[in-house]
Image (tube, rainbow, N blue to C red):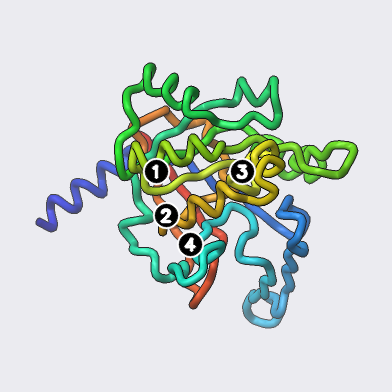
Amino acid sequence: MAERLAEAMNYLKSRKWVDLTHTFGPDSPHFSAFPDAQFETLFTLDDGFLAQRFSMVGQYGTHIDAPIHFVRDSRYLHELELKELVLPLVVIDVSEEVKREPTYTLTVDRILQFEQQYGEIERDTFVALRTDWSKRWPDKERFNNQNEAGQNQLPGWGMEALQFLFETRHISAIGHETYDTDSSVEYAKYGTLAGEYYVLEQDTYQVELMKNLDQLPAKGAYIFNFVAKPENASGFPVRSVAILP
């Protein structure tokens, strides 16, 4: 058994690994209600060792949201099972649509179009929405893309698309390149982040502010979400990595 495990690990290491995670700092784009992160050096190598203090909201940089982030009496981050954080990865590419329409909203029809080309989305997968919005990082102004009223104009998921994926295709989790699940159009429609609440209400997680989705195939890769284990956290910066077939 040990030999088989070693063979599996050697095989995985021989594949291409893609980092899906932004490097972030105090000046990085973030949700408008949150303050900038603060990085402080407490000791330098002149003191004998380097030690720093990091002060930031859990939902900062590329991060994972646990169900409790929106849903009462649901799971905290530390309660997610390890095997939930490793899933087959499906990437739906709508980057061309977003070039034409920055507030593009994923629909069921667009998912069915994807399936016509790549086959039905399998159950228990992680579905990522590629918009190439991450290429605007770390420029806050371009990332927020505000209109004259100061409202962000961002692409994202539509509620019906999410319901189709979770209730018909029975996927496990989602991820995207923007701050929130909902497109700006969906937010205006419901007056709240209804799609994000719906996802977390499925007793699952999502990963936000992903990058490098343009380096992944539509199907065949696996995602590994490496994250710290703070007690009773609603979310935390995550190191998301894809291993390609």
Query: Which residue is depicted at the point 74% across and 62% down?
Result: 34
Question: In the rendered structure, which disc, 1 or 3, sits on the residue that comes first in sequence?
Answer: 1
**Which residue carries the number 1 mark?**
166
209 relative to 36, above or below: above
Query: What SS does tag 3 mark?
Result: loop
Question: In the rendered structure, which disc, 3 or 4, sits on the residue that comes first in sequence?
Answer: 4
Question: In the rendered structure, which disc, 3 or 2, sits on the residue that comes first in sequence?
Answer: 3
Residue located farthest toward the top when viewing the structure as drawn? 117
Which of the pair 50/41 is nearer the observer? 41
**Which residue carries the number 3 mark?**
182
Indicate which label's residue lies in the foreground, 4 or 2. Answer: 2
Examine the image and state in which quarter residue 78 appears: bottom left
Question: In the rendered structure, which disc, 4 or 1, sits on the residue that comes first in sequence?
Answer: 4
Q: Position of residue 5 (x, y in %)?
A: 18, 53
Q: Position of residue 199 (x, y in %)?
A: 48, 51
Q: Position of residue 206 (x, y in %)?
A: 49, 51
Q: CA distance from mark 2 to mark 1?
A: 8 Å
Question: In the rendered structure, which disc, 4 or 2, sits on the residue that comes first in sequence?
Answer: 4
Query: Which residue is depicted at the point 41% across and 38% down?
Result: 165
**Which residue carries the number 4 mark?**
67
Q: Which mark is residue 202?
A: 2
Q: CA distance from mark 3 to mark 2?
A: 16 Å
